[in-house]
Image (cartoon, helix red, strand yellow):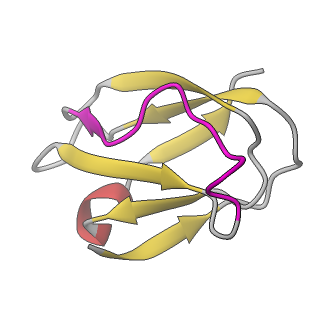
Amino acid sequence: MGGGYTTALAARAALISFTSPAAAARPAAGVNIIRPGHQDTFTADDNYIWLYPGESQTIKVSTVHGLKLSGRKAVFGKLNMEIVT
């Protein structure tokens, strides 16, 4: 586990959607959503997500500011992440 993907999004509660590319060679497994320095106040409705190629998942988070994904970088580095609301 190492590396990370940091968003540059405004701070507010939101839904975020992750999509694994359809052409991915393997699933995005065990992707963990964190907010470094704010573990005691950050919440996510789901974590350690598993996405098969082409699959999407939407997760409610308390903020989108400063989020980081941890896991195998070769896998989650290809995930598409967007704010839904």
Furthest residue to the left?
A: 26
Residue 50 lies in the magenta stretch: yes
**Residue at horizontal 70%, vertical 60%?**
38
> Residue at 73% of width from left, 34% of height from top?
62
Residue 24 as seen in the image, left or right of residue 6: left
Instruction: Kindly indicate the quadrant of the structure image that contains residue 73.
Output: bottom left
Residue farthest along the bottom direction in this orientation: 3
**Residue drawn at x 64%, y 37% as measured from the top left:** 82
Nearest the camera: 43 or 14? 43
Q: Give how far across and how far down residue 77 sits, in percent.
A: 39, 63
Task: Report the magenta stretch's main SS.
Answer: loop
In the image, 74 versus 12, the foreground residue is 12
> Residue 41 in the image: x percent, y percent?
72, 47
Residue 80 higher or lower than 44, as above or below: below
* Picture quarter with the N terminus: bottom left
Q: Tell whether 73 sits left or right of 79.
A: left
Residue range in magenta is: 38-51
Looking at the image, the residue that sits furthest to the front is: 40
In the rendered structure, the answer to whether residue 69 lies left or right of residue 21 reads: right
